[in-house]
Amino acid sequence: MDEENELIALRRKKLEALRAKGVEPFGAGFEVSGSIAEVREQFKEGEALRAAGRITAHRDMGKSHFLDLRDATGRIQVYLHAKEVGPELIDLFRLLDIGDFIGVEGTCFITKSGEPTLKVRTFQLLAKALRPLPEKWHGLQDVEARYRQRYLDLLTNERSRAVFEKRIAIVREARRFFEDRGFLEVETPILQTIAGGAAAEPFSTHHKALGLDLYLRIAPELYLKRLLVGGFNKVFEINRNFRNEGISRKHNPEFTMLEAYWAYADFEKVANLVEELICNLAEKVCGSQTLEHQDPDGKIVRTINLKRPWRRTRYHDLVREVAGRDWFEVSSEERRERATNEFKLEILPQLADFEVTQHVFEKLIEEKTIDPLFVTHCPKELVPLAKQNSADNSLVDVFELIINGAEIAPGYSELNDPVAQRQRLLEQAGEEKQKIDEEFLLALEHGMPPAGGFGLGMDRLTMLLTGAESIRDVILFPLLRPKKL
């Protein structure tokens, strides 16, 4: 039997001993004076307070014991002495372990070292931990174990816990930002008969009662635009989307987006809004518009400057900067050859000409851009739901916001011409005409006001604001293969 199994066996014996004494190891509620942080705020010598939490440290001094009690808000020291609690509770105490939850009632006092401490009058076992926690200072060393057993990662890794506390604050502050500007938060369907609003492979399912094949949404866009038709001029949704595609450092099949639509605005006004939003979040959550990303040893490896105004440059101009001033004048065959031989990119034979250029853009521009960059006026083939540019019908009025080598947010002047929209969707669908969302086109035919809209990847935004290197580090429970038992 290995050491961990021996410890588990010992804890189970203690569990049996507790029950033999008539003690319920998984107790009921316990009235507390507040969270541990609130108990520390109320702390006053001689005051009687009640606190509950997990035992995370034990210092045995013979007849007296010092414990660290923790919850999500902090730690407090408790002191237990045999003379104070009596033999019955001391016998019970000997059956406790690191990781157990207890509730204590005690008197506040300050130790000689200046530590605020509760002197225990009585305590109650609230939950027995049958497995030991990872060693405090090392936590979970196996990266996959950190994702699979996130609860242990949060218990033992302060850096990980801080990332998720920031994520919670980012979502809260983003919601407040939009509400303060008159946007209405709405909810749209996750189960959809046609997966629209983006070019992506959906997850499929089936509804038995209606006999319907359904899809998990890949984007909420087409439903949010229906609300513009219905007279809601400013709407946003913080939503879960699902795409049946690969997993990488920047991609998880289930992810969170913030999408917003603003009637009578255009992509330029929306870009201003996104710029203001991210700078606001950086100030509120990080305390600065200068982000310093650190490695696990605390060394600064990258500095990102979010201070406004952000650079805005046209797509074609950026491509010319890296691929040559004549890139769009040469033949498609020469573009393909240059991308392959000069830039050492893998160009598959089935890629269309605009996709070859996009591949160059992603590898030579997007991945190398650190400070914020709005890429504007993209080819219409890339964005079938955006309004065509009035001066050049090969382009659409859009932006792609790139920060730290990743697209953070695309935004458009939304296409509200139902005839042009139908044609774009037909071109996107190819032979699969059944993929056209006729209900959405019907809504457009009733009239949608001109509008600007954008989608912001909340996972990637959290990576940016916390310095996390992988999307799995900012999703509490990322998708993993089932563990073989």
Image (cartoon, rainbow, N blue to C red):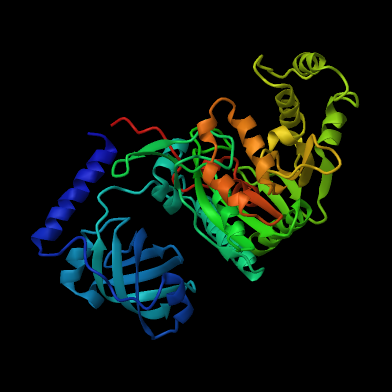
Q: Is residue 392 left or right of residue 278?
A: right
Q: Nearer the viewer, residue 233 or 136?
A: 233
Q: Is residue 341 above or below residue 177?
A: above
> Which residue is rendered at x = 26% and y = 70% of the image?
29
Q: Nearer the viewer, residue 477 or 8?
A: 477
Furthest toward the bottom, the residue is 46
> Which residue is rendered at x = 83% and y = 34% of the image?
316
On the question of residue 303 being in view, the answer is: yes
> Which residue is rendered at x = 32% and y = 78% of the image?
106
Among the 4 quarters of the image, the one containing residue 351: top right
Q: Is residue 475 left or right of residue 123?
A: right
Q: Nearer the viewer, residue 448 or 30?
A: 448
Q: Nearer the viewer, residue 469 or 194?
A: 194
Furthest toward the right, the residue is 325
Residue 445 in percent (x, y) is at 62, 50
- Quadrant including the C terminus: top left
On the question of residue 111 being in view, the answer is: no
Residue 289 in percent (x, y) is at 74, 57
Among the 4 quarters of the image, the one containing residue 8: top left
Residue 468 in percent (x, y) is at 59, 45
Task: Give the number of callouts.
Answer: 0
Q: Is residue 161 above or below residue 38?
A: above
Q: Is residue 284 left or right of residue 97?
A: right
Residue 279 in percent (x, y) is at 72, 58
- Quadrant including the N terminus: top left
